[in-house]
Image (cartoon, rainbow, N blue to C red):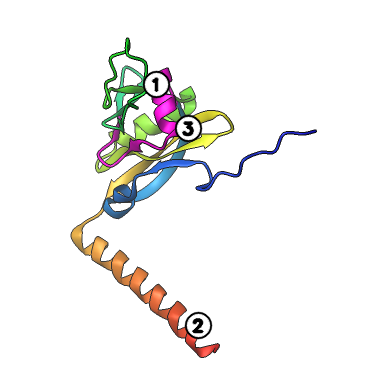
Amino acid sequence: MSKQKKPQANGGTIALNKRAKHEYFVEQRFEAGISLAGWEVKSLRAGKAQLVDSYVLLKDGEAYLFGAHITPLQTASTHVIADPIRTRKLLLHTKELDKIISGVEQKGYSCVAMALYWKKHLVKCEIALVKGKKEYDKRETEKNRDWDREKQRLVRESNR
């Protein structure tokens, strides 16, 4: 008898950084592995992660995830001191790191964590090279989103 796979309710997504989509124009996306401790993996399986104020710090030719908050579980091991906002190393290929470093050195660009998700049994972090939006850009985005919603509503009503 074969094992039945449990379908994941949210498609493997652990945490999204919705604020980043509102604050920045996304130029280029990268998939990075992330170095985690055992208690962090258990917390991620329970969905206890936030990426709201996180960003990617580039130092000595390596990338680090800074400001991501992974809440420790109450049932985590008692002999481990859990730091929920510790800096975590991101695992990238050298070519990808070079692209990110050259992009960040350009004026106005920065690197932000967009999402944490499961890929098979591994935790991956989607990071993006982004450029900041001005206030009028944010209003324009909201206006377009509202108009798209209104168009869908009109089409749906006309089909009745």
Which part of the image, by quadrant, shows the N terminus? Answer: top right
Q: Secondary structure at mark 3?
A: strand
- Displayed quadrant of residue 64: top left
Q: Position of residue 35 (x, y in %)?
A: 42, 21
Question: Which of labels 3 and 1 is toward the front?
Answer: 1
Q: How many C-alpha atoms fall within 10 Å of the one at disc 2: few (<14), some, or many (≥20)?
A: few
Please state if 57 lies on the left or on the right of 41 as rendered: left
Q: Position of residue 127 (x, y in %)?
A: 40, 37
Residue bearing mark 3: 124
Q: Position of residue 77 (x, y in %)?
A: 36, 15
Question: Which of labels 3 and 2 is toward the front?
Answer: 2
Q: Secondary structure at mark 2?
A: helix
Question: Would you say the residues marked 3 and 2 are in contact, meaning their CB atoms lie under 8 Å apart?
Answer: no
Question: Would you say the residues marked 3 and 1 are in contact, meaning their CB atoms lie under 8 Å apart?
Answer: no
Residue bearing mark 2: 156
Tell me which residue sits at (43%, 44%) in the image: 28
- Which sits in the foreground, 66 or 13? 13
Q: Earlier in the sequence, mark 1 or mark 2?
A: 1
Tell me which residue sits at (36%, 19%) in the image: 61
**Circle 3: residue type:** Lys
Point out the stretch of residues depicted in magenta: 34-56
Tell me which residue sits at (66%, 38%) in the image: 5
**Circle 2: residue type:** Arg
Residue bearing mark 1: 39
Q: Is residue 36 magenta?
A: yes
Cα distance between the residues tagged 3 and 1: 16 Å
Q: Earlier in the sequence, mark 3 or mark 2?
A: 3
Cα distance between the residues tagged 1 and 2: 48 Å
Question: Which of labels 1 and 2 is toward the front?
Answer: 1
Q: Earlier in the sequence, mark 3 or mark 1?
A: 1
Tell me which residue sits at (53%, 28%) in the image: 122
**Circle 1: residue type:** Trp
